[in-house]
Amino acid sequence: MTVLVAGAGPAGARLAQRLASQGIAVTLVERLREANQNAFSSAAIPIQAVSDLCIPAEAIASHWNGWQLVDPDGIQHQWWSQDHLGVVLNFGSLRHQLWQQAIEAGVEFLLGWRVHSVLTVNDGANVELIGPNGLCQTRRVSWVVDATGHRRLLLGSTAGSKLSDTDCMLEGAGVEWILQGDQKTTAHWRDRVCFFLGCQWIQHGYGWIFPMAGNQLKVGVCRLPPPMKECLEPMSSILNRLLIKNQLDQLPVIDRHGGILRSSLRRSEAHVVGRIVGVGDAISTANLLGGEGIRHALVSAEVLTPLLVEACCHQSSSNQDKHNMVLMQFERLLRLRLGWRWNLSGRLAKRTWWGLCDQKGDRRLSGLINGLSMRVSAEDLSRLLFEYRFERYGLRLLPYLMGWR
């Protein structure tokens, strides 16, 4: 039995490696030719995830033990811990390490290739691939995995990908620059992750400055406006303003990249359609409250692996019903793994970014930040933002969620 994985991001590469280690023949198809191409991701994850998700040490760019939120009035709010709270990843290095792990596990890796079409049949799928210089191949495989991220190139082309009437899609765009500093210019930023919130920074979004290795800084902005909302100011202008206000505009820019973010609030899109299975951002595992997607993508690969292995073990076409029953558990098991707080976090993301467009939105956000500043520790804030432990602050967050203030 053969599985073809389209897309070698964190979800696709991890899934391919895990399947191959279980004896499944895997082909991994990636349109990029180098791991560092357009390596857009804020890439901050909690410290526990490093061990839980087997993050390669070579992919860690820095550790941090402090949170800094700059509110709409420009006031800095800080929370500190004596221990490391999280890491910032070098996304290009993470890709490279995951690719190497997949190759070492025996995965066939096709760089510079893409899936052109998938035709599902009873006992498999015919996949047409297009490679460098227009080369074409047709493969017959048992299962196809859509790990193409927000593009949803395979599941997104099917009728089954339509969202339910009660769901909606959060969509946005981000731009990120890597700056080269020195010991003096990066000293303020080396031990913390910093977010900028409010209309003076960016409407319908947020900015960030994260530390990287070698006195580098990762600086970016992300905007997630409501549907049909026209945003006239270019993202590069917004990012430049962030740099100027923080006196970083003279530092050399050594890399520029950007990307699109798309995630449904309730993940009501189909996870399995015929012989195509989605994973990672293709089925909206990212949570856009803080733009975090890597951790959830890896979790989705871990949940899918044993199910896909079991489906591959039933090789005869007479076991088609068994295939379907096994993989149809994926959505339920993933929802259980991510937990009910995930949906509440999505609702809070929609409320925050869509409403952050005027002075009223700024006042509401400032009130929330001030309340957290007075009442929570750095560890509490990490649990709130990474583990979605909103119930601990339910009475304080309820007015914000409901729009009462």
Image (cartoon, grey):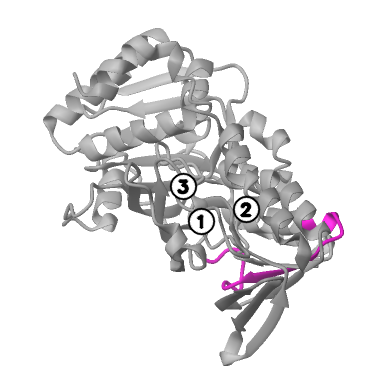
Residue 282's label in the rendered image is 1
The residue labelled by disc 2 is: 11
Q: CA distance from mark 3 to mark 2?
A: 23 Å
Secondary structure, mark 2, is: helix
Residue 186 at x, y percent in the picture: 47, 39
Say whether residue 64 is left or right of residue 242: right
Inspect the magenta stretch and tell me whether residue 81 lies in it.
no
Q: Is residue 185 above or below residue 163?
A: above
Of the residues shown, which amino acid type is indicated by label 2? Ala
Q: Quadrant of the N terminus?
A: bottom right
The residue labelled by disc 3 is: 218
Of the residues shown, which amino acid type is indicated by label 1? Ala
Residue 402's label in the rendered image is none
Give the quarter of the image for residue 266: top left
For the point 57% across and 73% down, the residue is: 31
Write down the region rendered in magenta: 19-37
Secondary structure, mark 3, is: strand
The answer to which of marks 3 and 1 sits earlier in the sequence is: 3
Residue 388 at x, y percent in the picture: 48, 25
The answer to which of marks 3 and 2 sits earlier in the sequence is: 2
Say whether residue 227 is left or right of residue 79: left
Of the residues tagged 2 and 1, which is closer to the observer?
1
On the question of residue 395 being in view, the answer is yes
User: How crowded is the residue under tag 2: few (<14 C-alpha within 10 Å), some, or many (20+)?
Assistant: many
For the point 13% across and 28% down, the residue is: 360
Q: CA distance from mark 2 to mark 1?
A: 10 Å
User: How crowded is the residue under tag 1: few (<14 C-alpha within 10 Å), some, or many (20+)?
Assistant: many
Secondary structure, mark 1, is: helix
